[in-house]
Amino acid sequence: MFGVSIPEPYVQHQQLRIFKKRYSILVGSIAVAFLLGQILLLFTSIQEEQFVLLSFILLYVVLLISAGLYMFYYIKTKKLKKQENWEVHVKTVYVMDLSIRDRDEVLSYCHLHFLYYQLLLF
């Protein structure tokens, strides 16, 4: 959540739910506010070039604000994880899936076909 890996037993933690809900409400409200501002710009006597420039600026402002909020909640989530010692109580298990190599097209070719190209170069 917010770029922080959360151990499975703590995924439904109450504070994480609050973070997610607040982030969603804030970003959604900001996006709606800027959308309404964009619609209001349509009804003004603003020139087309200025409208496009303001629309572009508004878009980047929304993106920067949402990225800032994401970072804010990333830091809060990271602090909560450290404060609650979630990593201490969880057993780390490493899993490696080697079956992907069976489906790799590059590895399925015989390596001798490269010899053909090297003979062509000489």
Image (cartoon, rainbow, N blue to C red):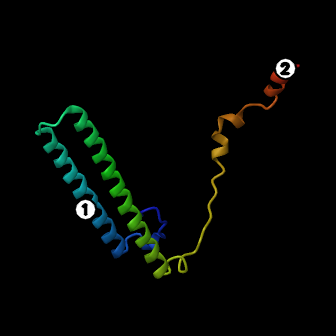
Residue at horizontal 38 percent and vertical 67 percent from the top: 73
- Quarter location, residue 27: bottom left
Q: In this view, does 36 lie above or below 46?
A: below
- Mark 1: few, some, or many residues within 10 Å (few <14, many ≥20)? few
- Is 78 or 99 nearer to us in this picture? 78
Side (left or right) of 70 relative to 44: right
How many angstroms separate mark 2 from mark 1 (CA)? 63 Å
- Is 105 or 71 nearer to us in this picture? 71
Q: Which residue lies furthest to the right in this view?
A: 122
Kind of residue at disc 2: Leu
Residue 121 disc label: 2
Residue bearing mark 1? 25
Q: In this view, does 10 lie above or below 49?
A: below
- Mark 2: few, some, or many residues within 10 Å (few <14, many ≥20)? few
Side (left or right) of 105 relative to 37: right
Kind of residue at disc 1: Ile
Task: Please state the horizontal and vertical placement of residue 66, each as a whole percent of the image.
Answer: 34, 57
- Is 87 or 3 nearer to us in this picture? 3
Where is the N terminus found, in terms of image quarters?
Answer: bottom left
Secondary structure beneath dot 1 equals helix
Side (left or right) of 16 relative to 37: right
Task: Please state the horizontal and vertical placement of residue 61, each as a whole percent of the image.
Answer: 31, 51
Where is the C terminus found, in terms of image quarters?
Answer: top right
Label pair 2/1, CB-CB below 8 angstroms: no
Q: Is residue 33 above or below residue 87?
A: above
Residue at horizontal 53 percent and vertical 80 percent from the top: 89
Task: Please state the horizontal and vertical placement of residue 36, each as a whole percent of the image.
Answer: 16, 48
